[in-house]
Amino acid sequence: MARVKKGVNALKTRKNILKAAKGFRFRRSTNERAAYEALMHAGAYAFAHRRDKKGDRRNLWIVKINAALDAKGISYSKFMGQVKKMGIQVDRKILADLAENNPETFDRFVAQIK
């Protein structure tokens, strides 16, 4: 029986790792071991930051709404409390978009809440 070495598989694995690490700096793009480690860390960061991104977006919406409400002399917390109390189901993403792109519509919405 002939001896089967893993040459083909090893080359394929190496090629795929280095292809995925293309664009990395220094040894991380040319050395298999360093590239593999860099890819593992990159994947872990990507996973964690995909979740962080959701919170970052929400914080941005809150900042936009708060900036628009400051001009009207209303605090964000009182405004959102009133929205919840009135049972209006509009999310922060929509409110932030209105505040930024359609200020007159946002003003009418705020007038209804007061």
Image (tube, grey):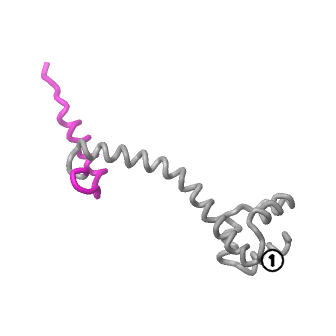
Q: Residue at x 42, y 45 (%)?
A: 44
Residue 93 versus residue 55 in the image, above or below: below
Which one is nearer the viewer's eye here, 21 or 13?
21
Pick out the residue farthest to the left.
2
**Left or right: 4 with respect to 61?**
left
Which of these two is toward me, 29 or 60?
60
Provide the residue designation for mark 1: 108
Q: Residue 5's quadrant in the figure? A: top left
Q: Residue at x 64, y 65 (%)?
A: 61
Q: From which residue to which does the magenta span run? A: 1-28
Q: Nearer the viewer, residue 50 or 114?
A: 114
What kind of residue is marked 1?
Arg
Place of residue 112 in the rendered image (x, y in percent of width and height, measured from the top left): 85, 72
Q: Residue at x 54, y 50 (%)?
A: 51
Question: Where does residue 89 sit, x and y in percent of width and height?
Answer: 79, 59
Apparent side of residue 7 relative to residue 96 in the rendered image (left or right): left
Q: Is residue 65 one of those drawn in magenta?
A: no
- Please tell me whether residue 79 is drawn above or below residue 19 in the rendered image: below
Between 81 and 23, the one nearer to me in the picture: 81
Main structural element of the magenta stretch: helix, strand or loop? Answer: helix
43 to 59, vertically: above or below: above
Considering every residue shown, the one lying at the far top of the view is 1
Q: x, y percentage for residue 75?
A: 76, 68
32 to the left or right of 1: right
Quarter of the image with the C terminus is: bottom right
Q: Quadrant of the N terminus?
A: top left
**Which SS class for mark 1?**
helix
Q: What is the x, y in percent for residue 92?
A: 69, 63
Residue 18 within the magenta-colored segment of the rendering: yes
